[in-house]
Image (cartoon, rainbow, N blue to C red):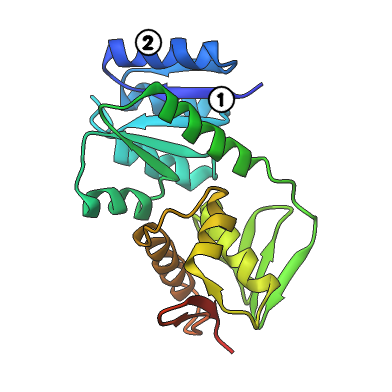
Amino acid sequence: MHTILIVEDDTNINQLLKEALTKAGYTCESAFSGTEAKMLLELKSYSLVLLDLMLPGISGEEVLQEIRKKGNVPVIVLTAKDQMDEKLNLLTGGADDYITKPFEIKEVLARIQIQLRHAQKEPSGTKISYKELTIDKTIFQVQVNDKMIPNITKQEFAILELLLKNPKQVFSKEDIFEYAWEEPYMGETKTLDVHISNIRKKLKQVTQEEYIETVWGIGYRLRS
């Protein structure tokens, strides 16, 4: 049984989400402030978090940072922001997905199912390496020269997994997106490009080696 934490200070929206998700078979708990959410996250484990940004007490962005310090539970941000740059900033900040208010409950349920399905991928128990870069699927960890890369998201891990399993292959953006997100590619490339940029930045924290090469007009591959 999946347990979902709904972090939303608007009582009506929180209750609407809780009723819909409960009806869909999920166990739900509610938090109405960032402070309350942080307390619950310290006490319990959740399958997924629905997180509003505009919260009393601790902000939604701060709650997201706290979540990412401790693990990789899927986080879907509920936001009134509709500018593309602001949405991309959410993904850069560690969110797995976002839903713009006002939203349809059907969309919320569909996006939750996608994130939970991705989180439930069975690891093979093997390590995959390329040069000094290693991913370990049993513990969801990425290392370079035995230095752990912090705060890797599920999509970032999946992108690296695909590239490392096929070190000589050039992958189109469509192929990478469909593998990492497990949903049809709709022609929008910015989300994938942001995740590639995030991977590069995180790798640069521990190495000067450039691992991912852009193949202009096609997609990406590992740098030989």
The mark found on residue 14 in the picture is none
- Residue pictured at 47% horizontal, 67% vertical: 199
Q: Helix, strand, or loop for circle 2?
A: helix
Q: Can you identify the residue that label 1 sits on?
A: 44
Is residue 147 in view from this perspective? no
Where does residue 189 sit, x and y in percent of width and height? 38, 62
Q: Helix, strand, or loop for circle 1?
A: loop
Quadrant hosting residue 97? top left
Is residue 178 in view from this perspective? yes
Is residue 82 shown above or below 137? Answer: above
What is the number of callouts on the image?
A: 2
Q: Nearer the viewer, mark 2 or mark 1?
A: 2
Where does residue 203 sit, x and y in percent of width and height? 49, 72
- Residue pictured at 56% horizontal, 25% vertical: 44
Looking at the image, which residue sits at the far bottom? Answer: 224
Looking at the image, which residue sits at the far right? Answer: 125
Residue type, numbered disc 1: Lys
Local packing at callout 2 (Cα closer than 10 Å; few below 14, some 14-19, many 20+) is: some
In this picture, residue 6 sits left or right of residue 134:
left
- Residue pictured at 30% horizontal, 53% vertical: 88
- Residue pictured at 61% horizontal, 71% vertical: 163
Q: Mark 2 and 1 residues: CB-CB less than 8 Å, in contact?
A: no
Quadrant hosting residue 79? top left
Residue type, numbered disc 2: Gln
Closer-to-camera residue (43/60): 60
In this picture, residue 205 sits left or right of residue 221:
left
* Quadrant location of the N terminus in the rendered image: top right
Where does residue 148 sit, x and y in percent of width and height? 58, 65
Q: Can you identify the residue that label 2 sits on?
A: 15
Q: Compare marks 2 and 1 and give the one earlier in the sequence.
A: 2
Closer-to-camera residue (36/167): 167
Distance from the alpha carbon under mark 2 to that under mark 1: 21 Å
